[in-house]
Amino acid sequence: MNTSVIYSSYDITNPQLQNFASRPLPQKVYRRRRLAFLSLVGLVVFLGVLMANEIIGRIHGVPGGSVVEAAGNPVIYVVQPGDTLWEIADKFNPEGTDIRYTVDELSKVTGGAQLQPGQRIVLNSGL
């Protein structure tokens, strides 16, 4: 069995290693890391709230966010003596909607502000 040793011209006994740990990183590296971490935390919180909303909705029988009544049947309202567009809008105004929008939609449906007792107004679900 033969053993051969190859010596190089490099000094292996005292290698000069650079100490990278003692050199601080630039501030923009730390900012980038913080931004990435906060983005990740924000995403986790957002998805957690989204999932909690879905789970709570399934428990209460209404999965998902608030549903606009797009698929419902239209409502027919018969105008009573003394009714105004504002009173009718107050009865059928969707939650969170400005009543002025509902009055404007009723005005378009009725063809103006004049109402006659006995007049039938077809109200689409969700106006």
Image (cartoon, grey):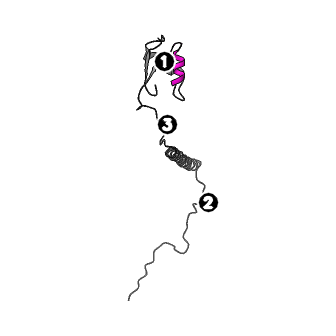
Three-letter code, disc 1: Asp
For marks 2 and 1 on the same chain, the one whose residue lies earlier in the sequence: 2
Q: Is residue 66 above or below residue 19?
A: above
Q: Are marks 3 and 2 in contact (CB under 8 Å)?
A: no
Q: Disc 1 designates what residue?
A: 104
Whole-percent x, y for residue 37 in the image: 55, 50
Q: Disc 3 designates what residue?
A: 66
Whole-percent x, y for residue 59 in the image: 51, 46
Residue span colored magenta = 78-92
**Nearer to me, 60 or 63:** 60
Three-letter code, disc 3: Ser
Q: Is residue 102 above or below residue 22?
A: above
**Residue at position x 41%, y 29% in the image:** 73
Indicate yes or no whether the magenta region holds residue 90. yes
Q: Which mark is residue 22?
A: 2
Spatial separation of the CA atoms under disc 3 and disc 2 = 55 Å
**Nearer to me, 126 or 32:** 126
**Nearer to me, 17 or 43:** 43
- Where disc 1 sits, the SS reads helix
Q: Is residue 20 above or below residue 73?
A: below
**Nearer to me, 120 or 86:** 120
**Residue at position x 59%, y 60% in the image:** 21
Whole-percent x, y for residue 110 in the image: 44, 15
